[in-house]
Image: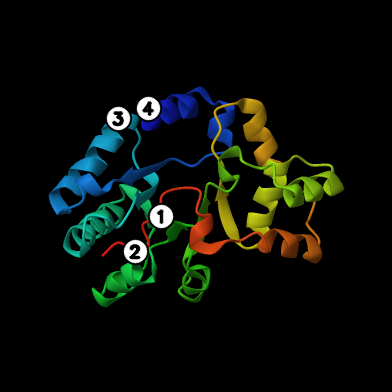
Amino acid sequence: MRERSLTLSVRRGSAEAMCSSVPSKAFSDTHGYESTKQGVHDSLAKMKFDYIDLFLIHDPLSGKERRLEAYRALLEAKKAGKIRSVGVSNYHIKHIEEIKEAGYEMPSVNQIEEIVNYCKVNNIVIEAYCPIIRGKMDHPVIKEVAAKYNRDPAQVLCRWSLQKEFVPLPRSWTPSRIHSNANLYDFELAEEDVKKLDDLDLGKAGSISWNPVDAA
């Protein structure tokens, strides 16, 4: 459904298209070599595009064998020109290490909330999922920093992501919000304000989405 909506937006030249690449995901119940190959084919057919910008393995919950087979299928699709970049989502260090141990190229992206240093060392771009914390932006520190820069809290949180060298992925279907979330390049947070936002980190206990890092 989301692919279909995004496709219509891109083809109509709407605000969503101006601020989005075209991604897709392989969820754990579709992992495996043949099923992932079919998933790429189905996504291309549904969107009526020649290629997909970024195809992610959504989570590591299917187990080592099936997720590696899914990853191999995506790499082959990339080689065939059907995908531009292959990434993973919600992977912990051990899940990425198994890709390296299998001799495959490393993912371009890990859409995560953790393992920042590992990804940086291995030249994996960090895509921040839920960068505006599902709209729960009423913490006094967030509001204080937003007021200081005369920005809304979502802009401050997305700007924080950029200054941490993350790629924020805020979701919205409202054109005004999409434009606002993209208007991040005419201000910069001072070091002390970045530190204030850093200090809000609660680690695993602060996860605002499901957390698969302990997946076997």
- Kindly identify the residue that appears in the image at 26 percent across and 43 percent down: 40
Locate residue 161 relative to residue 171 in the image: left or right.
right
Please state which amino acid type lies under the numbered disc 3. Lys
**Which quadrant of the figure contains the N terminus?**
top left
- Label 4 SS: helix
From the viewer's side, name the closer residue of 157 and 213. Answer: 213
Kindly check if marks 2 and 3 are in contact, taking CB atoms under 8 A apart as contact.
no
The quadrant the C terminus occupies is bottom left
Tell me, yes or no, whether the two marked residues, 4 and 1, touch with CB atoms within 8 Å: no
Instruction: Give the residue at x 51% y 48%.
Output: 208
> Looking at the image, is mark 4 or mark 1 earlier in the sequence?
4
Q: Residue 139: where, in percent of width, then height?
A: 70, 47
| Residue designated by label 4 | 4
| Residue 154 picture location, percent across and down | 67, 42
Name the residue carrying label 3. Answer: 46
Q: Which amino acid does label 1 sit on?
A: Asn
Callouts 3 and 4 close, C-beta under 8 Å: yes
Q: Which amino acid lies under the numbered mark 4 shown in the image of this protein?
A: Arg
Point out the tag, 1 or 3, that comes first from the N-terminus: 3
Q: Residues within 10 Å of mark 2 (few under 14, many from 20)?
A: few
